[in-house]
Image: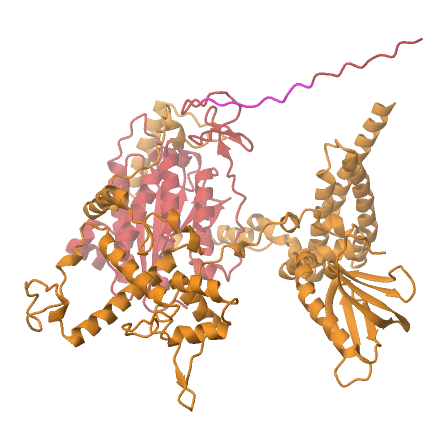
Chain colours: A red, B orange
Amino acid sequence: MASEDELNLLVIVVDVNPIWWGQQGQREPEFTLCKCLDAVMVMGNSHMAMTRTNRLAVIASHCQDSHFLYPSKSWESGDSGGDEISSSRDGKYELLAVANNLIAEEIRSIMTKTEVTGNSTDTLLAGSLAKALCYINRVSKELEVGQEMKSRILVIKAADDCALQYMNFMNVIFAAQKQNILIDACVLDSDSGLLQQACDITGGLYLKIPQKVALAQYLLWVFLPDSEQRSQLVLPPPAHVDYRAACFCHRNLIEIGYVCSVCLSIFCNFSPICTTCETAFKIQLPQMVKPKKKKLKQAA
Amino acid sequence: MASLSEEVLLVVKKVRQRKQDGTLYLMAERIAWGPEGKDRFTVSHLYSDIRCQKISPDGKAKIQLQLVLHTGDSTTFHFANESTALKDRDAAKELLQQLLPKFKKKANKELEEKNRMLQEDPVLFQLYKDLVVSQVISAEEFWANRLGGVNNGEPAPYNNKQEVGISGAFLADIRPQTDGCNGLRYNLTADIIESIFRTYPAVKQKYSENVPHNLTEKEFWTRFFQSHYFHRDRINTGSQDIFSECAKQDEKGLKSLVTQGVKNPLVDLLSLEDKTLDEGYGISKALPSTSNANKSVKESSNSAIIKRFNHHSAMVLAAGSRKGDPPTDQASETSSTDGNSRDSDFFQPPLKKVKLQEAIEYEDLQRENTPKTVALNLKKSDRYAHGPVPLQSQQYTTSQDIINSVSYIQQEMANYKPNLTRVLSSTTATSAIAALSPGGVLMQPVGQQSINQMVPTDIQGELKHLYIAAGELLRHFWSCFPVNTPFLEEKVTKMKTNLERFQMTKLRPFQEKVQRQYLSTNLTGHLEDMFQKAYSKFHIWQTRRMMRKT
């Protein structure tokens, strides 16, 4: 049992890439962004309902920016939320109702403001993760004396990986590892090598779900328990992660290669000059053995 | 028979060994016994082989001496000469006691080293048991690579002993005790004597001159203590005293010390004065009087004691800084604080400079002399920023697609209202649960148990030992290639037979044992592979050799 004062903060990063979701909506009308957000809300509500000290944050990861869906700045003022809450009279826990309403409102405003240009069609996932880390850091600094906090990030990924974000992504992963923040990943469409690495390094769970429609069930079953409880449960085993490096010349994944001892760049073929730092290498060629001339015995 | 060049240290007649009469000879490097009347030695042991000697207790009728060798064998000598048996035996024992320690160290060292290594490293011990005790390889091969250090005869690291300093109070340690009847008893130990000699080389000189020709040691020291040289008031120094010269030398030394002065230009000793106006009021500037007559008796005896104290301290310091003991080597000392050596005027100016520089400069404020490094010059540093290219080709989306998708999603989300009661249908939920349960689609690898849970721990331990032993043998085998010398050829063939023997004696029984326990896992496959590779390599080498010979 978690102690009374321990906070559990769950940050859900939802990939709301409009291009992908638009195409998805046209492909499979039974699972659209609305359904996905419903599932996310269910997950968020369940998390907050587990313990009173649990906290939630939701970030929408868009092509243009990353946006906090919950908690939002307008909520702090407190006035505007009054009317909408009183309208739901089903006796719902107020916090959950407020959260749901805020999330819905925010996502609506984000999507209406979408302006997509041709070049940026990739989800800014690394940026969203960085924002999540910053938020976690801020909350941990605002804790009262004696309170401890455990936090994790759940990424729900839809679109494909963006190769340009590699460096930022790796930095985020290592920062999370240092802060003992788990990164879980629920992947809807295609496997993501970066997220596999993230989960492996930080100790989280990576899952590619076979049925998108049952997203809520997968989220509740696999990702709702926190790290202590996971050790008691039977959950999907970790997948094999491909940690091979990519050579600098062709960007192919290689298992054995040549590494420059000066700049540590990796190549798949040997070249006498390293193209990154222009160091010249000398390799000793195997010495040629001269065949010994055998004296032929002269037949008498 | 003993060679003529051997030095015979002791001969004892009428010594019986194994009920035979004979003579015992103690030589420079060995002890030997020959029966009476014969020229040859039947028993001969080198001192380095002898571990220890034992003697029979004093009360017993038989007077015996037993030698125990390193190998565990023992030889007993019975001293049968009626009159001198005990004396003979004791003489032999004394001599052996002196000789044995010299030879002991050489042989023991190796064995001790080996024992120590085996005791410290349990893995090594197990390897030893597996390979040598079960006769797979010989002990020499086992120790061949491991004992490198001992056989090279490295000098022990304890040779650089630190010099023992001299206590400043060593003279005070000789506390005289009253003897009861008006005499005094001085307790002199070897340490104190050494301190005296090191501090006062003049005394040492006198000692070497007089003892043992003129005086015994006891007499010398008695004279020393009686002389006024030792006592604090050196007023009456009779000319008969052998130490009067020492006193004169000391005076001379002190004077030269004073003239030498202190070499540090920043220290001005002369401004220090003992004459104070009153307590706490500072130094009076009255000129010191030079005539002795004005000094009171008390002052002069005080100054004599203080002079002696100063001289004593100076001598102690000088003895400490003098390395080794070169009393005849004083000519080589150029800058010592001992007043009896030559002074060093020519060293004055540089010393001043050094002292001044020390006072002015601080070491850590100097510029650091870091080694010069070469700067890293990266031409294409953006290469580091890219990760691997994704394996699937990216889906190409036309701009029309993009516009369509965006407008679609905007339409959809414009009227978004969360409908949390209709998130999941029961069929989809149950199918998801089925996939997540053990045996489901997502849970496959869980069914596979890892090998270390299936194999019992004792078998795992045995396997580990087998691997270590096999690794050792294979290392010996593979290190023989390329085979250049006949020694390596021999070794290679020997190692191959060793490998085969190991396989027969250790590997096969283990495999059978594993099979008997119905463990279907292939635990020894890798080991077999390694052995097969070694055999094939040997075979290739052998055929090549045959071809070269023909």
Residue toward you, B237 or B172: B237
B191 and B516: which is toward the camera? B191
Q: Indicate yes or no whether the magenta region holds residue A263.
A: no
Q: x and y percent of residue B314 in the render?
A: 30, 61
Residue B313 in view (yes/no): no
Q: x%, y% of residue B230? A: 35, 72
Q: In this view, does A5 lie to the left or right of B146?
A: left
Res. B287 image quadrant:
bottom left
User: Relative to the observer, which residue lies in front, B377 or A143?
Assistant: B377
Residue A263 vs residue B365: left or right?
right
Residue reaching furthest bottom? B180
Query: Is residue B411 visible to the viewer in this orientation of the structure?
Result: yes
- Please report the residue visible at 51 percent of the width from the left and 22 percent of the height from the top: A282
Task: Residue B396: name its quadrant.
Answer: top left
* Image quadrant in which the C terminus of chain B is located: top right
Number of numbered discs on residues: 0
User: Where residue A145 sits in the image (x, y, percent)?
Assistant: 25, 65
In reply to whether residue A284 is colored magenta, the answer given is yes
Q: Which residue is drawn at 77% across and 14% down?
A: A293
**Vertical side of B66 occupied by B115: above or below:** above
